Image (tube, coloured by chain):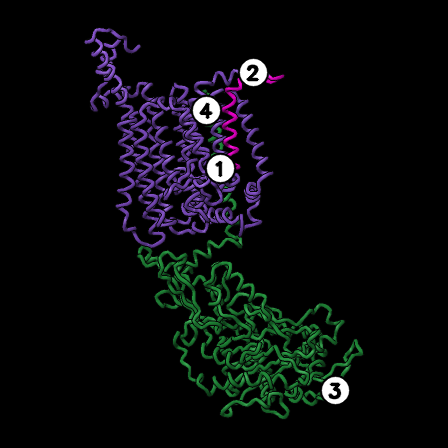
Amino acid sequence: MNRQIRQLAVGLMMCYVVLFATLNYWQVAQEQELNANVENTRAVRREFNKPRGDIVSADGVIAATSTPIPDPNAEFDRIREYPTGDLLSNVTGYFTLNFGSTQVERAYGDVLTGNTTEQQLRALGNILASDVDNSGSVELAVRHDLQQVAKFALGGRTGSVVVQDIETGAVRAMYSNPTYDPNTFVTLPFDEAREAIVDLQNAPGDPLLAGAYQQRFMPGSTFKVITTGIGIEAGVIDRTTQFVRESEWVPPQTTNPIQNYRGSTCGGDLPEVFRRSCNIPFAQTAISLGPDRMVAGVDAWGIGEELPIDLPGAAASTFGDTADLAQQLPLLGIRGFGQNDDQMVPLHMSMVAGTVANGGQMMTPYVVEATYDHDGRTLDRTQPEVWKTPISAPTAALLTEFMTGVTEGDRGTARSVQLADGQRFAAKTGTAELGLVGDPDRVHAWMIGFAPLEAPKYSIAVVLTDLTSTQADAATGGREAGPVVKTVLDYLLTGDGANADLSGG
Amino acid sequence: MTGMLEADLESTRLTRRDRRAVAPLAYRRRNAELTLIIMAAAITAVAYTLASLGSNAEIPPGIFGFVAFLLGLMLIAHFVVRRFATGADATLLPLAALLHGIGFVMITRLDDELASLQSLWSLLGVSVFCAVLIIIQRATDLARYRWLLFFAGASGLLLPLVPGLGANINGARIWVSLGPINFQPGEFAKIALAIFFAAFFAENRELIAAKTWKIGPFRLPEPRFVLPVLVAWGFAIVVMVGQRDLGSSLLFFTLFVVMVWVATERLGWLLLGVVLFAGAAYLSWSQFAHVQTRVDIWIDPWSDSLGRGYQIVQSLFGLADGGITGTGLGRGNPNQVPEAQNDFIFAAIGEEMGMIGGTAILMSYLLIVGAGFRTALRTDRTFEKLLAVGLTTIIGVQAFIIIGGVIKLVPLTGITLPFVSYGGSSLVSNYILLALLIRVSDSAARRLGEVPDEPTPGERWAAWQLRRQIRHDGKQGTGRQGGS
């Protein structure tokens, strides 16, 4: 029997060796793969239970905060709350256990939980202290008051408002409809939260995506700022260039004519065609430039590149497929005035306006002003950076003159929009005809601009995307988006927002 | 004859000092055991403190009470072993104490409310351990009650199937409810059956091995020796089908096959057992949806990772999150695995103590298995040998089945991890098992002369009665012969 007992002992030992090998397989060989599995929420869960700092607006309003749950038997130690509801959700994003995190919550998760190297080093001194809260906080460049004004100005219509500091590129407002309130799902149990998020994902207009920087829309005539800039830089057009007054023009390679907006007759010198927003002159400019110079030009404006904002998942504007443009000159012409496959991110259009006001320098946009450690010491303060320099200062000055014509000149498309207290501003309107099958009258109404004219401080882009109008004309963009721009700029320049104290936060 | 008996009895009445002098080896073993128990308690205390630091960043307020309680229990167990099983193996009790302690810490960390209940079970378990060692002082006495144990074990196994008594908990009908008390008789039945098998095979092993019954070209043992074998196989099937308890079924059958193989020294039995079980397993797989489910989620838990495969997938996530060194006690999320305090406690240990901690658990079981088989090799009594083999197989195979299930090596079957999992039935039955193993180990040491083989109180009492009878007889002068 002893022989059998020894064999049995060896057999059982082999079983345990196999157990040991399997344990190795899961805990060593497969470790990274399992940890990377999307369904593995353990890392998030660990983060979830850590103290997490606040996200505060530029004017000191708490946009995201963690509240401890007093019940010691609760599954989690604290819940994440968004006191500003849907107002800043496009900036703060959300932080959930099972469905990840977005925007600032995602990009600055390490700061908020105290996981950056610097915070870890600073915390070394009290590693043995019972207080393990090392969470940092994030101060936004975005102003809560301005978000409220932007939201009010949009009045529930689908669209976006972006306001930036011209000199720094700091985003002061970035509000879009439709949006969402993170509080409605971040605290829900798994199944209900999943349902809520799936509903939001399937809702029209993608509320979970920030319209202002994660979506793009046909820009219409606002794109003429870019085409004009490229044309002047290349020497193809200048202030004195005369365009024939006509209602139709047949470009090369086709017999189909290009028309001005709804077939109107339009022409004159460059300032006039710019302020009246004729289409044919800009199609001719784009075709004169030719595909190579036009494509190089839009590249110089950052079109085709993901916007360099300090948030994840930024969209890129696009000039459409440029492979065969030499054989498709009519398309090149149409894209020259912002139709066909042109798609611009609203934030990018604000940056375009800012570039004109900033002497040709396009600043890198940012929503986070500064980050702080647990004791309130500054970890990092965002330094303004130039992203692109698509035009020279003289070209920028010319464009400023043209854009001022839009608001002040004869038959300017934004002549109807006048700011309070006689504040002057420069702008460009756009009315993009989407030409959608089944929805032929759908237009995007745009207005971009900057103010005050004498010493530009803010750039703005407004787009309204749910307009349907059979009577749309070149002035529609200005008529529809103009009041939104006026409301926001009046508040900023002469209203309550003019003296906002931004030193808090 | 009677004179010698009296002389024997007088000469074996030893004082403690005498015993220490004649059995230095045994006492060195006991001192080693005491040291190891203190070490196990120290590890447990450190783990308890770390778990509290990890989750609340504070030293647990009840640390001294906790350590005093567990160490106290183990010291009582140790002194009972020292007095009543002086020659036993030194590692068995400390290893159990270590597993018990780590399990206790994990249960406390997983669910505060279960911890106080578990301390009650610990008290009960150690009390029963001591009682078994005190009451059963001769391992061979057990063999006398083999049929009683067989029927007790068999009815215990079937008890949960009785309407009104049995209760379905978590899909397995292995519970018996008697008023406020729930328990799993299967946990005790496995020990009763191990004793029965050991006694039955010790008695009949030659006859079973002889194969005197010819059917055509086959030579089989006599039917009356085969019958209990078939009955045991039938039990495994009943347990599997009636109680949906695949783990216990596998455990019973493995126990039985192993014992028949060791007893008869015929490999054929082992092969026959494997074939029979494979057949039964295949049949139940093809007939029962719940068995198919178990196999499906074993092969691919990822395809239904939020449903049926959730538990195993979460277990693997936990293990990976732990990695080699673990997340640290109190710093993981083992509660994400359903039943983490019970069948899946190994996943919780693997997550928070890492592969190092998991390997320590594996090593502990391997050492218990080693000590058990060493005991089986040291004793020269067939019954004791088979009993040690059976008890050791139960612990070793049970731990293998559940750990293997938790780490997706074998299909998951719900059984507890001996000494570690939460549960009264499990803890008490495992302490009984441990006491029996220690008893056999001591018994072997006595026959090897490492400990003076003193008569037990029961034997003293029998001898005293006998002597009185003889004296009485002598006075009467009727001269009846006593003893032989």
Q: Amino acid at mark 4?
A: Arg
Q: Can residue A360 be seen at all in this image of the molecule?
A: no
Look at the numbered disc 3 and give the secondary structure of its residue.
loop
Residue occupying the point 49% across, 70% down? A181
Disc 2 to disc 1, C-alpha distance: 34 Å
Graded by Cα atoms within 10 Å as few (under 14), some (14 to 19) or many (20 or more), the crowding at tag 4 reads some
- Residues at marks 4 and 1 on the same chain: no
Pick the quarter of the image with the C terminus of chain B.
Answer: top left
Task: For mark 3, name the chain.
Answer: A
Disc 2 to disc 3, C-alpha distance: 113 Å
Q: Which chain is green?
A: A
Residue B213, which numbered label? 2
Residue A247, which numbered label? 3
Residue that carries the numbered disc 1 in the rendered image:
B247
Q: Name above or below for residue B391 compared with residue B424.
A: above
Residue A6, which numbered label? 4
Nearest the viewer among B336 and B279 is B279
